[in-house]
Amino acid sequence: MVRTVADVVRRRRARGVPGALLVLAALVLAGCGGMPESGQAGPGRQVGEVVPELLVAPAGPRPGAGPAEIVGGFLRAGAASDVDHAVARSFLVGPVVRSWSPSHDVVVFPDDSSLKVTVRGERSPVRVDVRTPVQATIDAQGRYTEAAPGTTAHAVFTVVQTGAGWRVSVLDAAFGSWLPQYELDRTYSALQVAFVASGTHNLVPDVRWFPGPRPGLATALIRQLLLGPPRYLAGAVTTGFPPGTTLAVDAVPTTNGVAQVDLTSQALAATPAMRQMMWAQLASTLRRLPTVADLQLTVAGSAFKVPGVTGTSVYGDTGFRDDVRVSGEPVVLTGDRLAWVDPVSGLLSSEGPRLPQAEGLRAVSVGAQASTVVGLDDAGRRVLRLAPGPRRTVLLTGASWVRPVIDSTGALWEADQARPGRLSVLGSAQLGAAGPPGVPIQLAPAWLARRTVRSVDVSRDGSRVVIVSAGSDGVARADVAGIVRRPDGEPVALAAPREVARSLRQVDDAVWADRTALVVLGRRPADPVSTVYEVVVGGASTALPPVKGAVAVAAGDGLRAVYVITSSGKVLGRSGVGWADVGPGRSVSVSQ
């Protein structure tokens, strides 16, 4: 028998029995008065923003509470931020008191009203089953994964009668904790662990979620940093820490704003360049914490010299960059010409550097400072390098090319929808050559096999690609993967994928907006038409203001510079809480 909140409240009122079954959501109100317990979740905090100093003080077991109330109290206390979850453990009895690990997968569910409970039995021991829809999970390493539509979670609790009242004696072995969305928003911080794009000085963030603020937050971040890059960045990024390097003391204490990082002796094997990389990674990772202003780096308690670093500030410059910006203005394909978007008026303008002619094109991509312009013809069969005047060079021929993209290295990325499972890449030297471009590099990762690529875009730092692809059923998803490059910068492979925007049932388009966020056009199960979303890689999908008839997206420097192309042939730009009409157009490109 499955009971909802309303069911149980009605039954309790009808029976008038104080000890009757309570639904979990009705019970947890005593845990934190005055806080919202349900309702639609609003936009979350920005990545890197640490939650304020707000400690949730959950209530312990109430005398006379029945099995369902005990389970409800345990779930609420398990979602709180008290040290070692001492209150949550007071709902347990026996070996499970110490064996329970809240850091196992965290399940994020919509709100308390979505919980459904089944109580089986009336005498000790009884079984309490709890089910809920799932919005996301967070694993022990702080990796946040959106749940696919229709995902549910089920947990079973054995509850026994003790001298102190009912207590939970058995948990599922992998049970960690369950958090309603509002609890996640007020107790967790989305922070960044920094790696380095191979062959560059660009720092690449990997977003992790941890409860905080708390004294162990710096320790948790550095532990993850020392574990090395995640699978979806393998081969695309590197780390300055020699293999086997760990914390000499398993803690990163912070005193008067100084974070003390003491590493094991393996760190001594680092070259001078690696030491600079280590410092840059540590500083970029730790300076997201409001309690950290300076860094003291030691090995086995002794000073550790880093070339070029003379102070302790986490803002010290070692030549590494953790914010790669877009400097160019958007270029719009409007009618049979190319036009700039004026940075002051936000409207189309012919002022600025001269742009090539654009007759017979459906999409364009511009390189740095518009020095290189590539177009896709109306038929989708030829990718062309454009030059002033009518002169054009055929770069690629095929049956159905997607929108071209020139990345920050000057390379061209393309995919022919008639050739599933592969990408074609022309390096910067090939793209800039005066004569024929030569044979493109073919990337065919196993995970993309038999999937039709619908769009591709490369991150500003050149380390990651987002690919929208459809399977044989026509359902399209978005994946982010690291780009493995040769020493000369040419791509040779893609890392394992990390699917993003999993809460959408269909993805139409996706582009990079900044270091951690994508702009995605897609639909959730209840959406009748496609909607524009901000999607954090390692975070949630948040709907942007609605746009009627959106068919494609583009982005410039951040989420305030988002552009939407509509089915009526208009380009709209983000403006305040809505969209402004930029002018007529069918393609937008912003040089990297």
Image (spheres, helix red, strand yellow):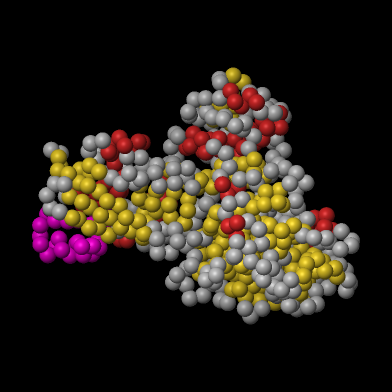
The location of residue 57, given as percent across then percent down, is 31, 42
Any magenta on residue 4? Answer: yes
The location of residue 472, given as percent across then percent down, is 55, 70
Q: Is residue 182 visible?
A: no
Q: Is residue 551 positioned above or below 58 on the image?
A: below
Q: Residue furthest bottom?
A: 568
Residue at 67%, 52% in the rendered image? 493
Residue at 49%, 60% in the rendered image? 502
Q: Is residue 176 visible?
A: yes
Which residues are the magenta region? 1-28
Question: Which quarter of the figure has residue 448?
Answer: bottom right
Q: Residue furthest left?
A: 16
Residue at 49%, 25% in the rendered image? 249
Which quadrant: the N terminus? Answer: bottom left
Is 542 displayed left or right of 311 in the figure? left
Residue at 10%, 60% in the rendered image? 16
Of residues 286 and 53, the one drawn nearer to the viewer in this rendering: 286
Of residues 127 and 578, the one drawn nearer to the viewer in this rendering: 127
Q: Is residue 574 positioned above or below 74 on the image?
A: below
Is 108 displayed left or right of 86 in the figure? right
Q: Residue furthest top?
A: 302
The location of residue 30, given as percent across then percent down, is 25, 49
The location of residue 371, given as percent across then percent down, is 83, 60
Is 368 displayed left or right of 83 in the figure? right
Is 79 displayed left or right of 429 in the figure? left
Question: Which quarter of the figure has residue 449?
Answer: bottom right
Q: Is residue 139 positioned above or below 413 on the image?
A: above
Which quadrant: the C terminus? Answer: bottom right
Any magenta on residue 454? Answer: no
